Structures are given as structure tokens and as C-alpha cells.
Image (cartoon, rainbow, N blue to C red):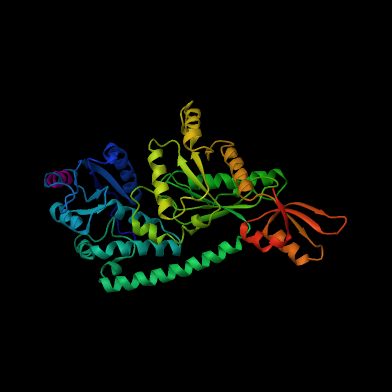
Amino acid sequence: MIDLVPPQERAILVGAPLKRSNAKFLVDEHLRELERLADTAGARVVGELQQQIDRPDPATYVGKGKVEELKALVLDKEATLVIFDDELSPAQGKNLEDAIGKRVIDRAELILDIFAVRARSAEARMQVELAQLEYSLPRLLRMWTHLEKFRGGIGVRGPGETQLESDRRLVGQRVKVLKDRLAEVQKSREVQRKNRRGTFRIALVGYTNAGKSSLLRALVRASAARTEARGGAEKLADKGADIFVEDRLFATLDPLTRDVSLGSGSMPVVVTDTVGFIRKLPHHLVASFRATLEEVREADLLIHVIDAGNSTWEEQRLVVDEVLAELGVHDRPTLHVFNKVDQLAPGHLSALAERMSNLLPGSSYASAVAPGGVDGLVAALRTAAEQARPVVRLRVPAAEGKLLAEIHRGAQVVESANDETTGDVLLGVRADAAELGRWERWILSEE
């Protein structure tokens, strides 16, 4: 993928919350996040403008006076790009560009651009291209103007000039091709999930940069340390080294699944790190990433990772809950994990835990960098896994060797004994509902 962005583009940020919304009280926080997004995309913020509005102006989103003020600020700061924190209609974007004489993009376009640069796997690149093409369909005329005037930049990366020069018919054909290919990828993922049947599946979800990848790496290393302590062959120094961690928004896009041990005698679990969420996440992006987010839908347990050191963590938690509701997984068993507790001032952790005992009972607290920082999380996961899959007792005739082998492959066998009278094999197992359904005739009782 060719990077068409000039080095360190100079950007002006614009925040214009509605007067009647709570966003006006958080506009500074939102603009700081927008600044981090711009930095991730390769731009340097040189100025910003704010205005509280009764309603968006249908022509330019902000009023005429603010447009003139913005034009003057762009000239004064020698800016090359204007980024709005709210989504602009195609007409608003074109009118603003005509008035200011510089490229104007919105938050959604900026996020799509970051995804275009960060996508590594073939699947992620297809998902991002699909989202960009669907976003660009009503904006094709303006995209053409971009190519004529500016020769690329933030907001016009991804599919490439050949796609942006295409007419709606060609773009529509490309959209159909991408959807068909992603459907094939989804079928392949379903096969992979079937191969993991019998394993307790956990998905990490949360706001971008909440530390999901860091937690996964810490869990993998803690797992390796337990294996090493029991005389296993795993090399602690090598574990988790391939899990990319960076203090940036949307550092990783591709889902990553790793086996994790929760301790001796615990059932095997797999933990999947998923793409982070953010406020005002483009709808097309959520739709195109549905195949990837199927991992969330199929998980036995969600770990909702919350950045305890972020002053707006409560708003971020609600944003994640909204996206999960949109995906139809808001009713999944969820463990809330407050991450980065090492960044809290002394005494704040106990105060947070006391408050969460009422708001989010059962929450866990973790640090991916402090020694033993995930011990409490591991214990909470072990409890959740055992509660989700209680021990079921089976009586299997000793002659059923094939069935016994199947049970040992598809379940965690926690007890095994022989009935001295009948010779039957008595097993205590933990397994998912699908596997237990196949062995229903052999079930004795449940605990």
C-alpha cells in the first residue's frame, strides 16, 4: 500500500458539539483524542477551533462566521488539512473545502485512513477497503476533486487512486467482490472455531489503547511462567514476543488468539485480542469488521478492558457497551477488568474498587507491567470458566474405547475411576453444551 501523505501535514481540529448534548462538557477531551488520531495518521496539529451549535448548518456544519474564522486560522497557521470531530455530509465537506481552499475531512474519514495504514493481513485490508468504498460512494465527486487538487493525503489513502477514479458502477462491483471474499473468510473462521470446540473461549474487548494487547501478552507470559515452574519446556523470554504492543490508538487491527493456562487442573482456554472501539466509530467500519468480530459473538466470556488511568474511562465504557449492543453481544457473560492500575495514585485503587463493588460487582483489577499484575485476573478467569462449565459425571462402558478417546479430546477430564462392580469408567468432565449433548446418554449427574 502506497503512503501518499506528505511528511507532517499541518492540521486544524474543529469541535462543534450541540448545545443540548453532554458532548459540550467533554469537547476538550474529545479534541485531545482527535489530536492523538491525527498523530497516528501522520499529521501535526497546529491549531483548533471550537463552537457550540444549536444544530448543524446543512451547508457547512458550523456557521458562516466560524467558516471565515477557520479560513483565517488556516492561513495564519499555514495548515494543509482541517479535521472535524463530527461526521460531515458530502455536501458539507465539499462546501467547506470550496470556502477554505484546503482539504476537509471528518473523524470517520480519519479513522478509516488510520485503518488503511495499519491493516496488515489480507482480511483486514479487504475489510478496510470495503468500508472506505462504501463511505466514498456518496462522496465520489469530492474525491475526484481531491485527486485533481491535492494528489493524496490523509483521508484519501487505502483503495488507491484507481478506485477513487472509478465511477459508482465500478465501485459497486468492487464492493460486491469484497463482500463475497469476506464471506469466504467468515466460513474459514467458522471451521477454525469448530476445531476449537471444547475449549473455553475468551475475547478481549475494549476502547482503543485500553491495553488489551498488553494484557494478552502478560497472560501468555504468566501462563508460560506457570508451565516453566512445573518443569515444562516453554521458554518464558520468548512467550508473547510476537504480540505487538504500542502506545497508540488502533495499534493492532487483526485478531490474535493464544492458548493460556489458568493453572494446574484448570481447563484449557484460548484468549483472542480484538480490534479496539472508539467513540463515533464509522458505521461502515463496524459492518465490514463483523467477520472478525464474530470471535466476540462466539466467545464464552468477554473481558471488557477499561483503562483505569484515563479520566474519561466511564464514557469509554459506555461507548464499548453501545458497540457490543450493535453487534448483538451485550448479553454475553462479561468480566470488567480495570487495567493500568499501576498508574493510579495511592488510595485511588481502593476507592475505585469500593465504588465498583456496587456499579460493576465482580470487577477485576490488573496491570500488564507490574510483577504479579495479572494474578487476580487469572484467578477471576479460572472461577468464571469453572462456573460456566460445571463438572458433569459420565458412566462409560470400558469397551467404548472410541467414545472414551473422544471425551478425552473434547473435554477436560478432572476425575477418572473404574467401577469395580461393572468395570465401567466413571469420569468427571468439563465441556461445552454441544459436546455434552452428544454424550447425553452417558451423563449421571451434574454438580
Is residue 1 in view from this perspective?
A: no
Q: In this rendering, is residue 125 above or below 380?
A: below
Q: Is residue 52 magenta?
A: no
Give the side of residue 101 with respect to residue 347, left or right.
Answer: left
Query: What residue is shown at x 12% (from left), y 47% (from top)?
Result: 64
Residue 313 found in image quarter: top left
Is residue 89 in view from this perspective?
A: yes
**Residue 10: x %, y % from top left:** 25, 48
**Residue 112: x %, y % from top left:** 34, 56
Q: In this rendering, is residue 156 above or below 360?
A: below
Residue 287 found in image quarter: bottom left
The image shows a total of numbered marks equal to 0
Query: What residue is shown at x 25% (from left), y 69% (from top)?
Result: 165
Give the magenta-colored segment's residue range. Answer: 67-74
Residue sitting farthest toward the top: 347
Q: Nearer the viewer, residue 282 or 37?
A: 282
The quarter in which the N terminus is drawn is bottom left
**Residue 192: x %, y % from top left:** 56, 64
Give the side of residue 369 with respect to residue 391, left or right.
Answer: left
Give the side of residue 89 with respect to residue 388, left or right.
Answer: left
Residue sitting farthest toward the right: 421
Q: Main secondary structure of the magenta part?
A: helix
**Residue 337: x %, y % from top left:** 51, 41
Q: Nearer the viewer, residue 75 or 188?
A: 188
Give the side of residue 182 with respect to residue 374, left or right.
Answer: left
Query: What residue is shown at x 26% (from left), y 41% (from top)?
Result: 21
